[in-house]
Structures are given as C-alpha cells and as structure tokens.
C-alpha cells in the first residue's frame, strides 16, 4: 500500500472525502437557522474588531474564536450600532442590541451567519489532513482511510464544525497541539517547542477549557515545560493586548464562579433537569456516537490492551492518549456545565485516529489473502453503515442519536439543547407551517433570535376579532421542556400534555391551538406576564369566539 500508485489512490480518496465533508457542512451552514449562541458570538466578535476592546460578552469565553469567525464581517461591513450597546458587561443586558445587530442590519442576517459559519468549517481542512497523515504514519493506508471517513461523516463533527461557535477552532487547536507535542518529543528543538507552545497559547485564548489541555501537556513535558509556558504566554499576551493578561485570569475565575450552582446551567438528562453528574458524559458519548464507530472503538481497545502487554510505548504516542483522557476526566468530574456532545467534540478526532490506526493494523495483521479480504469486507460494511446513518440525517446532524438510543425521534428522552435542537430548526418549522397554508404563527425562541427574517410573524393581536387562519404555535423542544419542567409555566405544562401537529427535523414542535379555548387563555396569561396586556385581552376574546 506504500507504493506510489497506492499513495496516489490514498490522496485521491482523501480529497474526495474532504470535498464531500465540506459540501455536507456547507449545506448545514446554509439551511439551518441561527442557534441560540451564534448571534451573541457574532455580535461580540465584530464589536471586538470595531472597538478594539473585549467589552461585550465580558464573562464568556476568550475572544480568539469570535475574532476568527467574524473576519468575513470586516468585508461585509454591517452597521456595528455601537450606540445601542449598554455599558454593562455580559450578554443579558445586551439582548436587544444583539437582536438589532444580527437581524435588523443593512447586511442580511443570513449572509452574516453563513459567512461566519464557513470560517469555522474551514478548520476541518487542516484537521482532516492531520488525522489522515497521523493515521497513515501510525498504521497504513487502510487505517488512514477509516480514520478520515469517521471524521468526515461524523454527525457530531458535521453538526458543530458548521456553526459559528467556539467549538470548531478549539477542536483543531486541541488536536494539533497534541500532535505538535508528540513531534517535539520525537525531534526536540527550539522551533518545535515554540510551535507547540504557540498552539497551546491559541488554545487557551479560544476557550477556557484549554487550560486543562495546557496543564496536562506541561505535566508530560516535565522539566521542559518552561519552554511551552513561555511560548504559550507570549501568544496569549498578544491576543489580550487590548486588556492585558490579568484580564484573562479574572474572567476565568469569574466564569467558573458564575457557572457553579446556577439554574441556568442545569441540564436535561433522561426526563429531568439536574446538575451535571460524572456518568452523564459517558452516556452522552454512547448514545450520540454511531454504533459502527462504537464497535470499531471497542475492537481498537481490545487490540490496545494486547499491545499494552507488549510494546505499548513504542506503538502509541502518549501525547495522543493522555491529554484527551485528562480532558474527558475533567469534564466528567469537575465541569459545572451540563453534559453536551459538543463539549466532547475535541475528543472525537482522537477517537477516530485510535479507531483508524487499529483498524489498519488489524487488516495488516491478517496473514492470508482470505483473512485480509474478510477484514476489509467487515471494515467496509461498518463504514457503509456509518455513512448511511449520517446521510439519513442530512442536514439535521445535531439531532442524531444512534439506533440503540431509539434514533433521533427518541432523542429528546435522552438529551436536549445542542444535542437535539439549539434553535437551529426554525426554518424547517416555518417551511412546514407555510406549506400548510398558515400565514402567521406564535413562535417561541431564545431572546436574541428574531423569526421575522424568515417572513413569519405572530397573529395580529391588535384586533379583537379572531383571524380566519388556524392559530398555530411553534416552539423548540428544548425550550418547551425547560419552560414546562424547570420554570413550571402553565402554558407549556399544558402543551406537554398535547400531541403536536408536527415535529420539524425531530426538534421543533408545532401545535394547533385553534380549537382549544383553554390554550388561548393560557397563552393570554403568558402574554400578560410579559407585559402585553392589550394582546392578552384580545386573546381572551378570541378564546370566547372559538367556542361559538
């Protein structure tokens, strides 16, 4: 397989697969509506470029990922609307400003969102390339092909790399820093040390979780850790020139305190909202990862155990094993955030590399032609199963749950939020509503979103006369469960007892309230609670008209 002909075939396969991955990711970036985190991230990132200060989202993650994702906005030049930004730190006080900047700007929201999403997706190019090269180096072309298939067609990867969030760049920097550290171990030198440290500096400037990775690699470096630390601090200092390095430490401390014990950080697991528990991340991995990948992972672990007894250290690079294990342990044991598959995203490249390397070694270990043919057939069957499961979800990869979990239709029973819908399926819901001839509907969403850009408005509550069209209500499953089970709001508790007309993309529920006076009264109470007394009064009149 190491002949020039084999190498050409391998690289041709890689580029075809990479092109397929980018096409699938771009489709998701274009077709999905804004997630709940993207408008704040886009607004914050562009404000950093325009003002030179990291004021907005002051207690969120470090600025690097937001700066990177919003580079296209420098060309598009939307109105920054800085006069609408409040002087208070944080995002809650700026919800109206975020909504105005993203959804009511001279540059269409869809244009801004899609261009920034493609910046995140771009990190898949070097990341896939690095996985392919390392898998080939550690095993053979079969292993490299398996590893890159697992990456390119992973529902978790496609779901999160195609969003303008912190996860795409963090995943690349995590994997590349560990790979650079391994290369530094093999070929010690000042350049390799500086490169590894620089990648670690970028990592911690992207997401506070990067501190965990930096700590593990510094531990592995031993006496040489000082070179890494100096290089990482130099890069972090450059990123934080507008505020200074002490600001990083203060924000890290403030964010960890804000997350601890706050109801906003309760997660939904198996029918209830609760604080994070150590067992939740392993369960999340088991239900959100396709079964073929889990089977390969189990097989790889069996072969890994055999090598452990023989020549483990010469066959498996510790920098590609210990940091992801340390990161996973930290998520399970000390994280105060709800378990979400996107937090596991940085671990998937290591998992895919591990699976690919041992799949390749297993094929190579078959001595007879018949045995090798059997091994390749089994591997091909798993890859076909894997690809078919992903393609069935296109482009709604976020809602993927494997067959053992009951598939995406039962995903809401396991996990929600960014594991099911993150506000990204509003377009699918609106398309369904319009296709059924309903021109207006009550649409619930997060505070920084605005469905008016999709030409969907609420029924006109200025009139006491009930409109002629059906009265439908749409709400993301995650928001419905949070409002009903956590906030105990009557309208949403009632909706939980009703069957929806339709569930768009496994995630966005649509209800028909037309024949239910009780539903309209509960809706009126909700409007009144939010300060719209006139609208609530007319809704109560509509409820009376429904009875006629």
Image: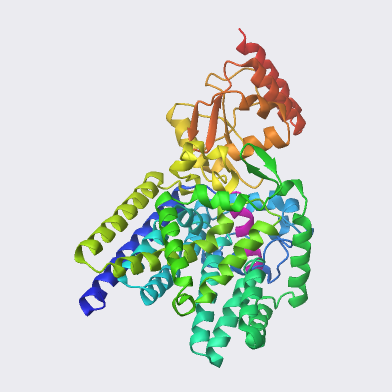
Q: Is residue 511 above or below residue 3?
A: above
Residue 68 drawn at (x, y percent): 56, 68
Residue in front for this viewpoint, 84 or 12? 12
Q: Is residue 290 above or below residue 270?
A: below
Residue 446 in view of the camera: no
Based on the picture, tell me whether residue 49 belongs to the magenta stretch: yes
Based on the picture, tell me whether residue 3 belongs to the magenta stretch: no
Residue at x 74% of width, y 77% of height: 245
Does residue 219 appear to the left or right of 488 in the view shown?
left
Residue at x 65% of width, y 78% of height: 219
Q: Residue furthest front?
A: 309
Residue at x 63% of width, y 88% of height: 224
Residue in front for this viewpoint, 45 or 385? 385
Residue 62 in view of the camera: yes
Residue 370 drawn at (x, y percent): 20, 62
Classify residue 130 by image quadrant.
bottom left
The quadrant of the image that shows the N terminus is bottom left
- Which range is magenta? 35-50
């Amino acid at each position: 397989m190491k002949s020039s002909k084999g190498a050409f075939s391998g690289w041709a396969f890689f580029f075809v697969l990479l092109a397929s991955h980018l096409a699938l990711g771009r489709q998701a970036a274009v077709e999905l509506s804004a997630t709940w985190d993207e408008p704040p991230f886009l607004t914050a990132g562009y404000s950093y470029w325009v003002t030179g200060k990291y004021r907005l989202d002051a207690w969120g993650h470090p600025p690097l990922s937001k700066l990177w994702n919003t580079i296209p906005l420098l060309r598009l030049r939307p109105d920054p609307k800085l006069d609408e930004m409040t002087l208070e730190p944080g995002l809650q006080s700026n919800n109206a400003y975020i909504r105005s900047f993203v959804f009511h700007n001279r540059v269409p929201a869809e244009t801004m969102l899609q261009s920034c999403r493609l910046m995140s997706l771009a990190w898949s190019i070097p990341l896939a390339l690095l996985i392919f090269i390392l898998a080939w180096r550690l095993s053979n072309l079969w292993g490299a092909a398996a590893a890159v298939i697992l990456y390119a067609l992973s529902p978790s990867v496609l779901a999160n790399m195609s969003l303008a969030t912190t996860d795409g760049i963090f995943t690349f920097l995590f994997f590349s820093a560990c790979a650079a550290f391994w290369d530094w171990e093999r070929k010690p030198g000042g350049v390799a040390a500086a490169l590894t440290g620089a990648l670690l500096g970028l990592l911690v400037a992207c997401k506070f979780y990067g501190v965990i990775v930096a700590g593990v690699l510094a531990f592995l470096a031993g006496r040489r850790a000082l070179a890494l630390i100096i290089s990482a601090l130099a890069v972090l200092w450059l990123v934080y020139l507008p505020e200074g390095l002490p600001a990083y430490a203060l924000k890290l401390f403030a964010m960890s305190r804000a997350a601890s014990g706050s109801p906003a950080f309760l997660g939904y697991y198996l029918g209830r909202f609760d604080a994070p528990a150590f067992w939740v991340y392993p369960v999340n991995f088991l239900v959100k990862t396709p079964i073929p990948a889990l089977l390969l992972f189990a097989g790889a672990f069996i072969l890994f155990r055999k090598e452990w007894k023989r020549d483990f250290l010469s066959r498996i690079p510790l920098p590609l094993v210990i940091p992801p294990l340390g990161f996973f342990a930290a998520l399970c044991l000390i994280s105060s955030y709800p378990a979400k598959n996107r937090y596991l995203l940085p671990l998937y490249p290591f998992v895919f590399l591990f699976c690919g390397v041992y799949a390749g070694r297993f094929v190579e270990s078959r001595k007879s032609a018949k045995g090798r043919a059997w091994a390749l057939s089994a591997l091909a069957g798993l890859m076909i199963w894997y690809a078919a499961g992903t393609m069935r979800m296109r482009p709604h990869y976020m809602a993927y749950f494997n067959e053992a979990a009951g598939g995406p239709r039962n995903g809401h029973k396991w996990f929600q939020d960014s594991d099911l819908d993150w506000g990204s399926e509003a377009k699918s819901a609106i398309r369904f509503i319009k296709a059924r001839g309903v021109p207006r509907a009550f649409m619930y969403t997060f505070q920084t979103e605005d469905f008016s850009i999709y030409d969907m408005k609420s029924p006109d509550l200025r009139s006491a006369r009930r409109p002629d069209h059906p009265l439908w209500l749409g709400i993301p499953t995650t928001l419905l469960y949070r409002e009903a089970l956590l906030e105990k709001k009557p309208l949403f508790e009632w909706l939980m007892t009703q069957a929806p007309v339709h569930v768009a993309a496994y995630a966005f529920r649509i209800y028909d309230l037309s024949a239910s006076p009780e539903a309209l009264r509960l809706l009126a109470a909700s409007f009144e609670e939010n300060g719209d007394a006139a609208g609530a009064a007319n809704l109560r009149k509509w409820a009376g008209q429904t009875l006629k």
